[in-house]
Amino acid sequence: MRTHELVLQWIEKQLSDGDLALGGRLPGERAMAEQLQVSRTSVREAVRILEAMGVVRAGVGSGKDAGTVVIAEPGSALGSTLRLHVATRHLPVADIVETRVLLESWAAARAKVGAPALDEAAALLEQMDSSADIETFLALDARFHVALAHAAGNTVVSAMMASLRGAIEDYAGKLTGNLPDWKATSDRLRAEHHAILAAVNANDGGRAADLVAAHIQGFYREAGVGSQTAGE
Amino acid sequence: MRTHELVLQWIEKQLSDGDLALGGRLPGERAMAEQLQVSRTSVREAVRILEAMGVVRAGVGSGKDAGTVVIAEPGSALGSTLRLHVATRHLPVADIVETRVLLESWAAARAKVGAPALDEAAALLEQMDSSADIETFLALDARFHVALAHAAGNTVVSAMMASLRGAIEDYAGKLTGNLPDWKATSDRLRAEHHAILAAVNANDGGRAADLVAAHIQGFYREAGVGSQTAGE
DNA sequence: CTACCACTGTGGTCTAACCACACTGTAAGC
DNA sequence: GCTTACAGTGTGGTTAGACCACAGTGGTAG
């Protein structure tokens, strides 16, 4: 077993045993190195991996943002991993989109009426109604979808859904230039968002799921994802 | 931007541009360091991250297994990430199971009759019928489920499904000791497997999905996952 | 009381070694 | 000629020790 894996194992045990919890701080790199009788390099390699996994965040200096602290951001970590695999051509973009449709439809169907996340979603829609800027709109759009997924109450589905979106964000972003009429598109997306939220609040899960599926597929189709004109 | 991120970016670009493909070899660490004008340490940190992501595999010595080569193993990488997040208590095991049910049901419903993966699945079932050893059985069981997911033709769903299972493999493994009667359980699981495959081959996707959901939920429930008696 | 600044501890980076490993080519011995 | 032994080469793995930038802390000069 390689040295950094030993460190990794040690840290994972600290987490499993509850000796290290969310928000907690790892010992300094030098201290860990001495404690485990390994070089600081090996400790750093382990920390790097955990950072890539979204399990810790490393901050220099001193104070609250300093040191290596335990966080919980699986979404971005999974997203990066998927993005790399898309780059190797192992994961087709179409499969990513299809999976996203699957997860988000399920979440929409399962969203619990009255969940706080739905109020947040509604607030986001209001902001979007008055956002002409394309980047602002897309950022709010992302948060809306995450909020909707949250309302289903499954952390894993939320994380995966966010990661799928993130994995092809840049890719899809380049394609928004293909859109013939952004105003028309954004108006349509706004209307669809409201319809989805309405269906969820009306407790009509089946309809909400259908609307979400059509919403996502419609966007990617219009942007040209899957039409093979993209990569080059 | 940190140095190792620069290296990461460079490698990702090589992949995106197709200059580096699956099975391809990265330049040696020393060569990359010189080319990018960074230290070998930074190069190694980047490689470590890619290794954790299942994008590359590093091998010492010389020959076919040597050097850092591009692979495509998102499953194990995603699995490790999820496992760590389960350790931090951020991802509940119940959510993992629920998501696995979601993905596998979908895959069973979408499995294409006549897919080669189904033949493999059938072959695995035969082997399982004559496997009394519990570990052998579980290994074959894992491969059966992967084969089934494969038959749906979505790489992302396959990878995620495998990673979900892997994330709680150790955790669930400890619980098999809770089973009152392994022979009875394994006989039941065998029968369920055959029924699932039969439903898929009969093109009855809905029934296959229901059977898969019941199969998975039944196993974890019997093993005691979610009953809070586990972690401690 | 305020402004400044040295101090301390954090992660970030680099250099220059040495190791284990696995193949390759060559030379020695049969 | 064939086989065996072994030095050579290039790979990742690991280490020690140094220096940097950063951000709070606390003392000190004004």
Image (tube, coloured by chain):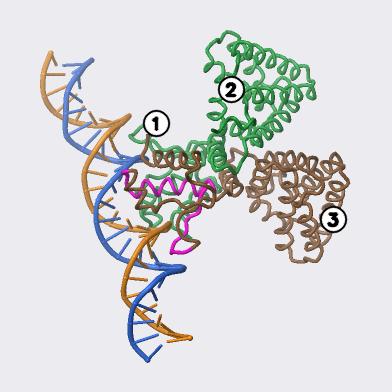
Chain colours: A brown, B green, C orange, D blue
Q: Is residue A54 magenta?
A: yes
Of labels 2 and 3, the one closer to you: 2
| Secondary structure type for disc 1 | loop
Indicate which disc residue A188 carries.
3
Mark 2 residue type? Arg
Residue, far top:
B130
Q: Considering depth in this image, is B217 or A206 the residue closer to the camera?
A: B217
Q: Secondary structure at mark 3?
A: helix
Q: Nearer the viewer, residue A166 or B86?
A: B86
Quarter-of-image position of residue B83 = top right
Residue A10 percent across, percent down from the top left: 42, 40
**Kind of residue indicated by mark 1:** Lys
Q: Which residue is mark 2?
A: B143
Magenta-drawn segment? A37-63
Q: Chain of mark 3?
A: A
In this picture, residue B123 sits left or right of residue B10: right
Q: Please report the residue visible at 78 percent of the width from the left and 50 percent of the height from the top.
A: A222
Q: CA distance from mark 2 to mark 3?
A: 44 Å
Question: What amino acid is at disc 3?
Answer: Arg
Q: Nearer the viewer, mark 1 or mark 2?
A: 2
Callout 2: SS: helix
In this orientation, which residue lies closer to the viewer: B35 or B45? B45
Disc tally is: 3
> Tags 2 and 3 in contact by the CB under 8 Å rule?
no
Q: Quadrant of the C terminus of chain B?
A: top right
Asked if both marks, 2 and 3, belong to the same chain, the answer given is: no
- Discs 1 and 2 share one subunit: yes
The foreground one among A169 and A126 is: A126
Q: What residue is shown with label 1?
A: B64
* Residue A133 image offset from top left, x and y in percent: 74, 66
* Left-right relation of B228 to B20: right
